[in-house]
Amino acid sequence: MNRRTRRGFLTASLAALGATAGCLGGGSGSNTPTNSGTPTPTPAPGQPLSTPVAGDPEADVTVAVYEDYACPHCQTYAEQVYPKVRETYISEGTIRYEFHDFPIPVDETVSWQAASAARAVQDEAGDEAFFTYSERLFANQSSLGPDAYAALTDGLSVDGETVRAAATGELYRPTVAKDRQNGIDRGVGGTPAVFVNDDPVEWQEIAFEPLQSAIESARGN
C-alpha cells in the first residue's frame, strides 16, 4: 500500500471513530525486513538499545510516548506539544521522558527506516543527539529518505553515511520491533500514544493541555 493511500485510510478511520486523535494501528503487523530479494543485512550489535530518555531519569513522574516517524499526527505532537513539554518539564528535570518506537507502519518503508536512522544516532552519539535528530525527522517528514537521513545529522557527532546505511538496511530493526511489541503489549492502538506513570492520556485532539493535566495530577498538584 502506498504512503498516500495508507494515510488516507488512516484519516478516514479516525474520522469514523471520532474519539481519539492519532494514526491508527496495532496488532502483530510486519516485523520482517522490507528489503526482500536481497541478502538481509546483519543487524547492528548490542541490541536491543536502551530506551532514549530525556529529563531526570530518576524522576517520580514518567512520560512515555510511542510514535511513528511517518505519522502526521505524531508530527503535530512533535511540533506543537513536545516543545512545551520540554520547556515546562524536561528542562527543569521534573519528569523522566521516554521515546518509544511504534511503526504502525504508516509507510512501510519510512516508518521503519526513519526509526533505524534515529537509533543509529542514539547508538553513536547518545540520547541527547537522538532527541535532536528525532525532532529533525518530524520537521522534515514530507521529504524523508536516504539523503535526508544522512543530511539531518549535520552538527551531530555521527557520520551521515553511517546513519544512511543504518536506515536503508534497517540495521536497528531488532530494537525498533521490540519497542513496537512492547507498545502492543501495553495496549497501544495508534500514534502518538502517551502514558503518564502507566496511565494513558486520553485526548480528543493533540494538544499540550491534556498531557499537562495528566502530569500535574501525577505530581499531586
Image: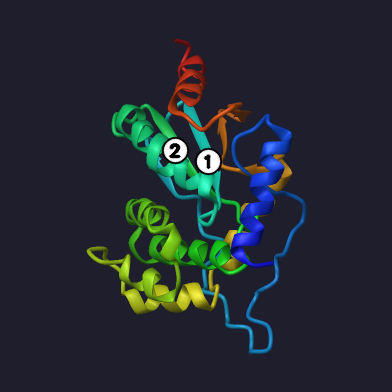
Q: Is residue 131 above or below residue 163?
A: above
Picture disc at residue 65: 1
Element type at mark 1: strand
Q: Amino acid at mark 1?
A: Val
* Identity, as a three-letter code, of the amino acid under mark 2: Tyr
Quick one: 1 or 191, which is closer to the camera?
Answer: 1
In the structure shown, which secondary structural element does the residue marked by tag 2 occupy?
A: strand
Residue receiving disc 2: 97
- For the point 62% across and 54% down, which residue is it? 7
Residue in view at x 54 percent, y 78 percent = 169
Of residues 15 and 200, the one nearer the viewer is 15
Closest to the camera, between mark 2 and mark 1, is 1
Residue 96: image location, x then y, percent: 43, 35
> Which residue is situated farthest in the right direction here?
27
Q: Position of residue 135 (x, y in %)?
A: 37, 51
Residue at (65% x, 60% y) in the render: 5
Furthest toward the bottom, the residue is 38
Q: Which image quadrant: the N terminus?
A: bottom right
Q: Is residue 33 something that shows in the picture?
A: yes
- On the rendered image, what quadrant is the C terminus found in? top left
